[in-house]
Image (tube, helix red, strand yellow):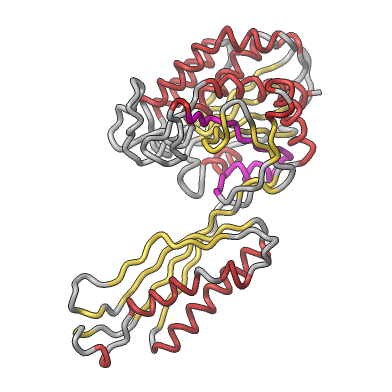
Amino acid sequence: MAIIKALIEKHYDSIVNLRRHFHIHPELSAQEFNTQQKIMDELLALGLQPKKIANTGVIADLQGKLPGKTVAIRADIDALELQDECNQPYQSQNPGVCHACGHDGHTAMLIGVAKTLVELKNEFSGTIRLLFQPSEERFPGGAEMMIADGALVGVDCIIGTHLWQTLEVGTIGITYGPMMASPDEFTIKIKGRGGHASMPHQTVDALLVGAQIAVALNTIVSRNVDPMEQAVISLGFFKAGDTFNIIPDTAILNGTVRSFNETMRTALFDRIEQVTMGLCQAAGATFTFDKHLGFLPVINHPDISKVLADAGAESLGSEKVLTINPVMGGEDFSQYLEKVPGAFMFVGIGNEKKGIIYPQHHPKFDMDEKALFHGVEIMTRAALTLLK
């Protein structure tokens, strides 16, 4: 429909203003009460009947002229525990809390989809279900709560998007299978025997054992994983000792494992434990190994990915629809995909000329707001196609 662009153009300023409102007033996971109320107010003004769900989320159905399929569109609404340094008029006014992942844009875009489709409701049959999900940034994630509260009841398929800084504005990224990895966590606690730094022969140096483990873990992917497969093991925390002249008796390593299937996930964790056990036994230390399995990987349904790609081509041109490699970040959108077919896409927001070069979760993160127009248009077109 040619009218779609005109309708989004009509609402574009309000969509941008909504994004800036949410950026100024970010809220952490499970604390999105004001965000929830703002969403409710916007949807009520459109004549919809939104309801609260998953404590701080919102759900609303937008009915077409006749019954038909139900297509869900999801946006996450929570912010990060991070000081905002974007240095814009819409910089966060909530100290230590920042929309540095783009969820302010996701929320504004889904309201924009609602604004557009309300004006087209006599042009389609079926139902568009709007899902504003809390707590994506905090495990176990809000998707699980949304599903438990009935978000997917009667839903035939689901789509979602993530504004993505590494893609240039005016492009989108699509995969036809694996899209995002499982973000798993592990903690290794090493127990040695402490002592005076001048008498290391009387100790079992937990710091040294931990250092050896840290180096060894970084060889697992390069030496135990098929080069044609994708996997990541990264350490983000290593703590041992409190002062310069005491050999510590304890060391703690905390890291993440990223993979795309259960076989690889199991193999990586098994190998981490084997390496840790061997090095501890060699040094005379003991250890505990705890793992915490995160979200499932995001695996797109290829047919629904094609609908998103076709909508992107219609909106931006086929040359702007990029088939990308999967990324090792995680997303609880995978929880929905376990229940109903669906697909996830990335919408580019990067613009080097405007200085929009900082990645997600960076204090200077920002976006080229023209991406909001593209996201609304593609999701609107894709949803209407899926209803057919």
Q: What residue lies at 67% left-to-right and 29% top-to-bottom?
A: 72
The N terminus lies in which quarter of the figure?
Answer: top right
**Stretch of the chain drawn in magenta:** 329-352
Q: What residue lies at 58% left-to-right and 19% top-to-bottom?
A: 373
Residue 68 position (above or below residue 286): above
Q: What residue lies at 54% left-to-right and 54% top-to-bottom?
A: 183
Left or right: residue 231 versus residue 85 is right
Left or right: residue 315 versus residue 132 is right
Q: Quadrant of residue 230?
A: bottom right
Across and down, in percent, residue 38 comes to 44, 20
Q: What residue lies at 70% left-to-right and 61% top-to-bottom?
A: 228
Q: Is residue 328 magenta?
A: no
Across and down, in percent, residue 325 comes to 66, 46
Q: Is residue 330 magenta?
A: yes
Across and down, in percent, residue 63 comes to 69, 17
300 or 27: nearer the viewer: 300
Q: Quadrant of residue 211?
A: bottom left
Q: Pick out the residue farthest to the bottom.
A: 201
Residue 245 position (above or below residue 318): below
Across and down, in percent, residue 317 comes to 72, 23
Left or right: residue 147 versus residue 311 is left
Q: Quadrant of residue 120?
A: top right
Q: Pick out the residue farthest to the front.
A: 353
Q: Pick out the residue farthest to the right.
A: 388
Number of residue marks: 0
The C terminus lies in which quarter of the figure?
Answer: top right
